[in-house]
Image: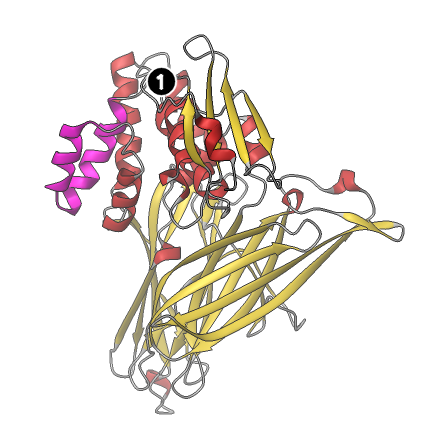
Amino acid sequence: MFFRKILILSIILISSLSAQEQQADKFNFSFDYATFRGHEDLVYVELYFSVLRNELQYVEDNDAFKAEFVIDAELFRNDSMVINKSWGGINHEDSLTNVQGNQKLLSVNYLQAKPGEYRLVVRLTDKNSGKQSEKEGVINIEAFDEENLCLSEIEFASSIKPSSEKNQYYKNGYSVIPNTERFFGTGLPILMFYTEIYNFTQTGQEDTSKYSIKYSILNGDQEVIREFPARIKKKPGESAVEVGGLNIITFTSGTYFLKIDVIDSTNKALASQQAKFFIYRPGDFAKIQQNDSLTQMQIAERSLQLLNSIYQSASEEELDQEFDATTYIATKEEKEIYKTLDLQGKREFMPQFWARRDRTPGTARNEFREDYLARVRMADREFRGFKKGWKSDEGRVLLIYGSPDEIERFPSSNDNRAYRVWRYFAIQGGVDFIFVDKRGWGEYELVHSTARGELYDVDWQRWLSPN
């Protein structure tokens, strides 16, 4: 499912962004969901959102400050909207100094839909600044078996506590605070999760009124690396709630899966569910860098191993999307090779692709990859229109040359179309790129540049005329 397939590389990108990139990345939010049994033939789709407080604009509100946002969730089937749900959130603070970059605002809501394949669009709007951020993808909502033993999807949490307070986090006697990124490790050494079990067989006999449940943790290759002892529990009824917390302090950074197996003692029926999560600890990477006993070759090998662990659980869609965005730096031969590869071949190809471009192969980090993919994200955020942002002219220049040293923006008028001038002072003794919004749609096209090999047009100002 689209929203589920979050690569561990996003952690590395976030942690390695320069101050300038972090300043530009002003409006990013995290999103996750899990499905539970609904009423009749409907599936209950629970939606989880989080946004950093300092990404929202606070305005004065009497003697305090207020941030306000709106979330829209739209479910489409065959290009027709079948569900549209909108809700909001407000956060008050006495002082802006209390708004820190590591503080999150959370929101939980739900949809009920029939099983099937849908396109889900989620949008977060800052009501004070008017800024928006949007994510979308295809999700497959599966039906729950009405007779046989089965489990809901697994919701990962940053906190689970018994509670009777009926708020947005309340579920069956617990307050479940969602972990929308599914990141654990530093600050979250306990893997916390919530799931529901359905369709226990009921006989009323003591020896068949129990069930067993077992947890396993798998690595990115779906290999079991730790099994926890099975526990025997008494059936509370036809269904049960399962909340858990597993100590993962000894696990290193990487991609993992939690698997839950349930056996009904009455009929020996087995049901399983699993979900992906991530562990990240900066110290894992620092240890590689600071270990004086390792040679540069060994460090490079360890760095490649980390890249391999990132891609081994990636889907073909994720791999294709990432490689497509490298079109400006990939060689013709690399593009031809990639076309011939199957899924496993692509998983092995991508670490080698980035390793060949590592500017500092004797270190644990691949800065080139981190910087390039950070610019892809920036381009998609800033320049997206009728096509992905990295495919636009501005996106291409950003990916090849990096962020400009200076940008001049000229708004449209009766005499001129809107245009922008990007200036790079350290490239080829200083170069300019001029982009014009030719169609008035907000998509700026390159019309002239002084960089070698780029479009050069001494009469570029003709594109400014609205006529």
Quadrant in the rendering for residue 401 = top left
When the figure is inspected, residue 457 is found, relative to residue 216, above or below; the finding is above
Taking depth in this image into account, of 217 and 394 the one nearest to the observer is 394
Q: Farthest residue in the right direction?
A: 63
| Whether residue 268 can be seen here | yes
Taking depth in this image into account, of 79 and 213 the one nearest to the observer is 79
Q: Quadrant of the N terminus?
A: bottom left
The amino acid pointed to by label 1 is Thr
Picture colour scheme: secondary structure
Rendered residue at 41%/88% (across/down): 40
Specify few, some or many for label 1: CA neighbours under 10 Å numbering under 14, 14-19, or 20 or more: many
Taking depth in this image into account, of 237 and 414 the one nearest to the observer is 414
Instruction: Provide residue 155's location: percent of width, then percent of height.
Output: 45, 62
Quadrant in the rendering for residue 376 = top left
| Whether residue 280 can be seen here | no
**Label total for image:** 1
Instruction: Provide residue 158's location: percent of width, then percent of height.
Output: 54, 53
Q: Examine the residues drawn in magenta and state their main secondary structure.
A: helix
Rendered residue at 32%/65% (across/down): 273
Q: Badge 1 is on which residue?
A: 363
Quadrant in the rendering for residue 24 = top right
When the figure is inspected, residue 209 is found, relative to residue 223, above or below; the finding is below
243 drawn magenta: no
Left or right of residue 235: residue 350? left
Q: Farthest residue in the front direction?
A: 467
Left or right of residue 134: residue 61? right
Rendered residue at 50%/40% (across/down): 382
Instruction: Provide residue 296's location: percent of width, then percent of height.
Output: 29, 13
Q: What span is in magenta?
A: 331-356
